[in-house]
Structures are given as structure tokens and as C-alpha cells.
């Protein structure tokens, strides 16, 4: 998470910076790793959880279009 502005937070999602509502997670702080969906911060992740999720998504993206 990059910064707060009231109940909205700015999040860098792989190079694209977007605004999300933090109403469900008002405790989110600058520097936190977050899981978002539908313009909402759903949960706060540890750095290890965020890295594991990024690795899994990269593996899935690498297999896109591959049938086997």
C-alpha cells in the first residue's frame, strides 16, 4: 500500500497504481502488503504471504494457454 486518503488507499499493483477502499480494513498502513478485489482491500498480508502469492500467480501466468 502506497498511501492513505481518508478511507481510500493507493496501492501499487505490479506497476499500476490504483485507489481502493479500506473500509473493510481500516487498520491498513503505508507499506503493508494487501489483497484487493473489486476496488476493496480484503486483507493485509505478511511479506511471506505476498511473495508466495506472487510466485503462484507467476506460475499460473506462465502456464496460460498450455494444455497438457
Image: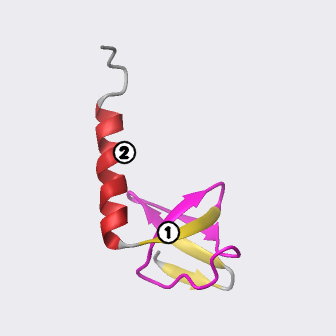
Q: Image quadrant for the C terminus?
A: top left
Q: Quadrant of residue 63?
A: top left
**Percent x, y for residue 32?**
43, 78
Q: Residue at x 51, y 81 (%)?
A: 3
Q: What's drawn in magenta, residue-wise? A: 11-39
**Percent x, y for residue 13?**
44, 59
Closer to us: 56 or 15: 56
Q: Residue at x 38, y 59 (%)?
A: 15
Residue 16 vertical position relative to residue 25 in the rendered view, above or below: above
Spatial distance from mark 1 to mark 2, Cα to Cα?
Answer: 18 Å
Nearer to us of marks 1 and 2 is: 2
Q: Residue at x 35, y 36 (%)?
A: 60
Left-right relation of 8 to 53: right
Closer to us: 11 or 41: 41
Counting residues from the N terminus, which is met first, the one under dot 1 or under dot 2? 1
Which residue does the numbered mark 1 point to in the structure image? 11
Q: Residue at x 65, y 64 (%)?
A: 40
**Percent x, y for residue 38?**
66, 54
Circle 2: element type: helix
Circle 1: element type: strand
Closer to us: 68 or 54: 68
Residue 36: image tag: none
Q: Residues within 10 Å of mark 1 (few under 14, many from 20)?
A: many
What colour scheme does the image use? secondary structure
Residue 9 vertical position relative to residue 15 in the rendered view, above or below: below
Left-right relation of 47 to 2: left
Q: Residues within 10 Å of mark 2 (few under 14, many from 20)?
A: few
Which residue does the numbered mark 2 point to in the structure image? 57
Amino acid at each position: 500500500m502506497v498511501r492513505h486518503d481518508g478511507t481510500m488507499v493507493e496501492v501499487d499493483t505490479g506497476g499500476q497504481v490504483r485507489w481502493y477502499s479500506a473500509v473493510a480494513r481500516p487498520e491498513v498502513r503505508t507499506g503493508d502488503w494487501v489483497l484487493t478485489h473489486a476496488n476493496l482491500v480484503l486483507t493485509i498480508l505478511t511479506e511471506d504471504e505476498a511473495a508466495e502469492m506472487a510466485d503462484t500467480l507467476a506460475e499460473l501466468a506462465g502456464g496460460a494457454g498450455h494444455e497438457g
